[in-house]
Image: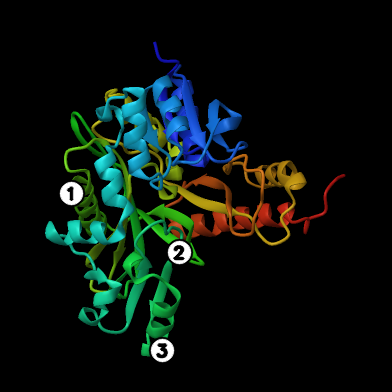
Amino acid sequence: MNTANLGFIGGGQLARMSIQAAQRMGLNCVSLDPAADSPASQIADSLTARFDNVNALANLLAKCDVVTFENEFAPVAPLRAAAAQAEFDLDNFVPSLEVLERVQDKLTQRRIYLNNGLRSPLAVPLSEVDQIGLPLVAKSRFGGYDGKGVRMIDTPAQLAKLRDEVDEANWLAETKVNFVRELACMVAIHEAGVTVFPVMEVQNTDAVCDITFPNEDEETASAATRLAVDAALAIADGSEGLFGVEMFQTEDGDVWINEIAPRPHNTGHYSLDWGEQSQFDIHVRVALGFPVPERLSGLRVTMANLRAPEGAQDDLVHYATAHTLAENADVRVHWYGKTQAKPGRKMGHLNLPIWSEDTAEAIAEVRQAQATFYAAYTGELETDE
């Protein structure tokens, strides 16, 4: 008998919050991560190893009924080798390793969207950049996230500089799309069909998600929902899983697909406090084949990320949390337990239910709570100590 119902490749905050959901269901979990002090390791059994360590992966697989992913960066070849070594059924990876391979290459993603007739920027290998023309967006095909591995190219000189600095085989070029807003939607594909979360609007800072809130334009939300489902089904190609779908909307109202992550997503964190099952509950349910609700519609919630600012002091975390909670009775703080506050690193997030009809007022309120936390976290507020 296996010792864990569910295993996680990756032990960051997404695994941590999924494990917390599983533990509320009475389930056992284990994670594997290169960091011995990962957020997930603080709340459940864990293994410390690189994602390409076949023996360690086989050890994890041997413990688990089902294995899912906290991120999409684990190389597939070692996972296949580990599954063979541990006699682990490949069907017990959720989503499948084929989905992982498709998502890991951003050029493959783009081609899938375009081949399925979905509105998506034209993308080609960087070596074929002449098909695109300037301006364009250059992206690392593998491993990029939160704005990392992305270059805006407006001039021939910028393009030449990029080509001097990178391996062209690992980069793509895509048409630059001018957009007015970014959108996101969580899509769960499961045995009974598809379950869709609400469409959220995303505001970024330094190319990283900063604030999310519900998109309340019915026409936009309807178009984005249809696109998110179609894109997730195209990427899944028969596999089950939870997918975070990123989109953007142009001035003429068209919604375009950007990228998909085959896992819980930052833009779905609001669901921890909306009263319905959260994205993490659904992640666990889909992975283990438990029933998933057909419809999800909870409280309107706005979310603000807590990224480590310059001068962050970890010994002030509890003070910062207490001060923020004391200032606003509605705010909920979620802290990830990361041991290093590197500038820009996601350390936690705030959720704030939207009680009024004025979404702008709610955004201002959650930004104020975010600013209060930062001020306390950096020692700019006087402490009682």
- Measured as percent of width and height from the top left, residue 374 is found at 67, 56
Nearest the viewer among 243 and 72 is: 72
| First reached walking from the N terminus: tag 3 or tag 1 | 3
**What's the residue at 26%, 35% (across, down)?**
295
The residue singled out by tag 1 in the image is 234
Screen quadrant of the C terminus:
top right
In the rendered image, which quarter is residue 163 located in? bottom left
Mark whose residue sits in front, 3 or 2: 3
Nearest the viewer among 120 and 169 is: 169
- Measured as percent of width and height from the top left, residue 227 is found at 20, 54
Circle 2: residue type: Gly
Circle 1: residue type: Ala
Point out the residue furthest to the top here.
1
Screen quadrant of the N terminus:
top left
- What is the CA distance from the residue labelled 3 to the residue labelled 1? 37 Å
Q: Is 168 drawn above or below residue 59 in the view shown?
A: below
Report if residue 169 is visible in the image. yes
- What is the CA distance from the residue labelled 2 to the residue labelled 1? 24 Å
**What's the residue at 34%, 74% (across, down)?**
137
**What's the residue at 45%, 28% (across, down)?**
21
- Measured as percent of width and height from the top left, residue 36 is found at 61, 36
Report if residue 245 is visible in the image. no
Mark whose residue sits in front, 3 or 1: 3
In the rendered image, which quarter is residue 321 located in? top right
Mark 3 burial class by Cα count in 10 Å: few <14, some 14-19, many 20+ = few
Circle 3: residue type: Ala
The residue singled out by tag 2 in the image is 147
The residue singled out by tag 3 in the image is 157
Q: What is the secondary structure assignment of the residue under circle 3?
A: helix
Q: What is the secondary structure assignment of the residue under circle 1?
A: helix
